[in-house]
Image (cartoon, rainbow, N blue to C red):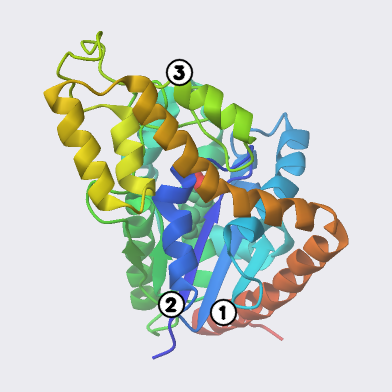
Amino acid sequence: MVKIALTGDRPTGKLHLGHYVGSLKQRINLQHEVDRNLVMIADMQALTDNAKNPEKIRNSIMNVALDYLSVGIDPNMSTIFIQSQIPALNELTMIYLNLVTVARLERNPTVKSEIKQKKFDQSVPAGFLIYPVSEAADITAFKANYVPAGDDQEPMIEQTREIVRTFNHTYRKDVLVEPKGIFPPKGQGRIPGIDGSAKMSKSLGNAIYLTDSADEVQRKVMSMYTDPKHVHIDDPGSIEGNVVFTYLNIFDSDVEQVAKLETQYQKGGLGDVKIKKRLIEVLNSFLDPIRQKRADYAKNIDYVEHVLQDGGKKANELANKTLKEMRDAMGINYF
Ligand code: TRP
């Protein structure tokens, strides 16, 4: 069986460590395991709640592309492309919309919570409500078997599976493939913000970006939430909910050293500044090669554009092929 993976991100800014832990890391590994790894910059989806601010999306596309390349998504192993360059996706979306009820869309838990969070109230854009259907088009157009993504994408993948079954059943042909989500191991897919809140996000202003300079990283780590009850160095400190230790556990490859620091911190006698200094070192040595690669690619934007165009060409071939099979199955192939 040919193994195909597809995933994507809305280009609404730069990517941060939350993106890395939640899905970039898995995608980078997956490149070696699948026959085709597709990575999509989901500008059409980003427009569903940014229709009045297209420049933001436009400006973010290059940022996200640079983030991808610098973090190790390799165009020799992956097809990187921009969603709006693939017209067939819109046609697939339109076909699927007839196979989904409005009630089902309104029940999608991720969309529901986003609607609340974005304070749409009574003015939810129709395009926003139906974005899970467009996401189903993204996934199925390439017959992806795998979708490496964060937990919040699980409802989209479930909805995609339903659409696939409905389509194949309704038009009596197994044209579409049911995808499987690939999620980070339990408890490892999410990184808290530097302020200690559960999720790192741009809107909460608590993110460390892949593009942050060494100084910014230092400043952010020094302001990081630790244990408010750990006032004096000699006080016993808590590891639970202590963001510095959470990060060390994810990024510090010296596991024994981290365990030692934890024991010492819990006993008392280890100051916050010490553990923060260690984290600054660890994060900067993780980010340094990424920064270096990014600077190199940024000097060669023509190459990056070429990668996106080339990816778009391949993606169009694949999506058009699926669309043709669908039209044939439905009998809307008149001439
Ligand atoms: N919904 C994803 C996000 O919020 C982006 C996305 C669009 C996507 N299409 C996809 C993810 C298909 C996985 C598969 O960033």
Which residue, given by chain and number where applicable, does mark 1 sit on?
Answer: 322
Say what amino acid the circle numbered 3 marks.
Answer: Ser
* Classed neighbour count for the residue bearing mark 1: other residues with Cα under 10 Å, few (<14), some (14–19), many (≥20): many
Which structural element holds mark 2? loop
Q: Where is residue 251 in the image (x, y as percent from the top left)?
A: 39, 47
Q: Is residue 239 visible?
A: no
Q: Position of residue 124 (x, y in %)?
A: 51, 28
Q: In this view, does 91 lie above or below 189?
A: below
Q: Do the residues labelled 1 and 2 touch (CB within 8 Å)?
A: yes
Q: Nearer the viewer, mark 2 or mark 3?
A: 3
Mark 1–mark 2 Cα distance, whole angstroms, equals 8 Å
Label 3, ligand 1: CB separation under 8 Å: no
Mark 3–mark 1 Cα distance, whole angstroms, equals 50 Å
* Classed neighbour count for the residue bearing mark 2: other residues with Cα under 10 Å, few (<14), some (14–19), many (≥20): many
- The image quadrant of residue 33 is bottom left
Q: Which of 304 and 72 is in front in this view?
A: 72
* Classed neighbour count for the residue bearing mark 3: other residues with Cα under 10 Å, few (<14), some (14–19), many (≥20): few
Say what amino acid the circle numbered 2 marks.
Answer: Leu
- Whichever of labels 1 and 2 marks the residue nearer the N terminus, that label is 2
Say what amino acid the circle numbered 1 marks.
Answer: Thr
Residue under the point 63% across and 82% down:
333
Residue under the point 41% across and 22% down:
224
